[in-house]
Image: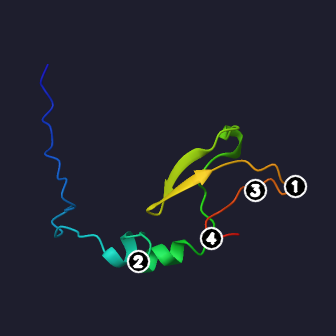
Amino acid sequence: MAEKKSRDRVTDGRACGRPAQHPDRLLTEVWPGTPMGELMRRYWQPVGVSRRLGALPQRAHLLGEDLVLSRSSTASGWGARRGTK
């Protein structure tokens, strides 16, 4: 039985003779103070699944920030969020 010849994998972003790709920092960096980071913070982001959240708070990391997920005993059912009183 003949062995299959393995293809060399290119892992630097090149394909079909195209030059190597470089990430666009304006679009890929989401840390606080970056343009895309500020844009993404204007919208709701899914962070956790409610049914998996128990009585104890859980850590989460999103858009370069450390967050805490917790349940609230208030009528709304929502815990405190970043930037709220």
Q: Indicate the amino acid at tag 1.
A: Ala
Q: Amino acid at mark 3?
A: Trp
Q: Are marks 2 and 4 in contact (CB under 8 Å)?
A: no
Q: Is residue 30 left or right of residue 4?
A: right
Q: CA distance from mark 2 to mark 3?
A: 28 Å
Q: Nearer the viewer, mark 2 or mark 4?
A: 4
Q: Which residue is mark 2?
A: 34
Marks 2 and 1, Cα distance to the nearest angstrom? Answer: 36 Å
At 41% from the left and 77% from the top, the residue drawn is 34
Q: Front-most of 42 and 74?
A: 74
Q: Which residue is mark 3?
A: 78
Q: Badge 1 is on which residue?
A: 75
Label whose residue precedes the other's in the sequence (4 or 1): 1
Mark 1, secondary structure of its residue: loop
C-alpha separation, residue under disc 4 versus residue under disc 3? 14 Å
- Residue position for label 4: 83
Question: Closer to the camera, 4 or 67?
Answer: 67
Q: Position of residue 59 (x, y in %)?
A: 54, 47
